Image (cartoon, coloured by chain):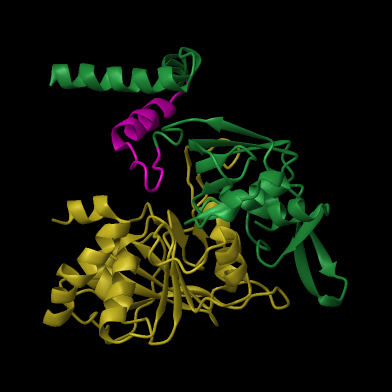
Amino acid sequence: MMAVAIARRLRDGETIAVGSVSPIPASACLLAQQRHAPHARLILLGSAEHFPFDGGMQEFYNFAVRGRLDVFFASGAQIDEHGNFNLSVIGDPARPTVRLPGGRANGVLAFVARRLILFRTEHSRRVFVPRVDFVTAPGTTPPGVYRLGGLSAVVTDLAVLEFRRELGRLELGSIHPGVTLEEVRARTGFPLAAPDPLPVTAAPEPDELTLLRTTVRERLETVYPEFVRHQA
Amino acid sequence: MNALQAGVMNVPFAPVRGLLHTDYMNIRPDFRVIENPYDPSEPIALVPAIAPDVAVFHGFRADRSGNVVTSGAIDAKLIAQASRATIATAEEIVDGDLARAPHTGALVAGIHVTAVVHAPHGAHPTACAGYYGDDPTHIREYMRAAAAADTFRLYLERYVLGTADHRAYLARVQEGRMAAAGRA
């Protein structure tokens, strides 16, 4: 469901990069490429096949900071109402209870990718908090700060939250089939505005499911063998 | 990345577009903000250059002149140039000149390399593409051990401080594996 919801946000011809340890966005990209975006250029970090640079991460990073990424994906250990996300530390930064590996480049890539899409398989109050413990990247920045793009949406196992840049906050965009508005609000640690009527995320089409279970699965296995094994 | 690139160029800092209004600016007093001197309307972050005394990286093959072929994904070339001394470990030491042979991956020129160490399985427990995959069993053992100071000390004693060299380390990993298989 998440992969399908993400795939539909990707457009043909775009340059799309997926951070490491991100099998769901990677599936979404491979699905979009098979279906409606055959000319999308995919960069899957951690993959030899979908990594077009021979100059390593340095070349990728420099490519990204020049504003060449249309879409970049990251997860979020914590995400707040204002679109700030935390991939760095949980707890007091001086004595963290959990130290996370995602801080590395997100403090820069969230500024330069045209659309940042966050994904999270756990829609809960632990993730959607009133205020993140650490701002790895801010939802909005004051005028004057160099910023080519920023947060576009957060896709979870329950819903799609859209970031309204002009309001500087996340709002509900759609809920997945079988999910209720009350459930999403109960599992979100901040007030969540919702459109009325509330759209339901379109369910996967049969051909999307077929692609996910065949071509996408085969290609994903070369990058994420453990993930594919657990989906069996 | 900007900081390492500054290290390569032997300049003291690098401007970064990004980082502003993140908490990195709060926990790192050495990260500064200045006005872009060429466009004062733009605030811009500065980070100090990273120029390590010593860098260590693992490669596939090394020759006797210090040329090393390694994975293109680990930025070995960048790290080797930013550091004052660079030690490369390698799966194989080969005769001949790697700089003149066709290769897959990245070639770090011997002129950037201070020393080469022959270390088969030197990337363990992580993978070395084309040689071996990662060792999820040992990675899990490490993660469990690293969760607390006392278990981590035991891990260090068993695998690092208590083994004479890399070969002994690999033998100890294997021992643990056999014992676990015996119990199962």
The image quadrant where one finds the C terminus of chain A is bottom left
In yellow, which chain? Answer: A
Rendered image quadrant of residue A213: bottom left
Residue B163 visible? The answer is yes
A113 lies left or right of A33: right
Q: Position of residue B66 (x, y in %)?
A: 63, 40
Q: Quadrant of the N terminus of chain A?
A: bottom left
Above or below for A56 versus B119: below
Count of numbered circles on the image: 0
Please identify the residue farthest to the front as the structure is shown. B96
Residue A109 falls in which quadrant of the image?
bottom right
Residue depicted at x 44% and y 25%: B148
Q: Which contiguous range is marked in magenta?
A: B126-149
Determine if residue A121 is in view: no
Q: Residue at x 43, y 28 (%)?
A: B146
A88 relative to B120, above or below: below
Extreme residue toward the right, this view: B37
Q: Which chain is green?
A: B
- Whole-percent x and y of residue B65? 65, 40
Q: Is residue A30 above or below residue A13?
A: above
Q: Is residue B125 above or below residue A158?
A: above
As for residue B148 lying within the magenta part, the answer is yes
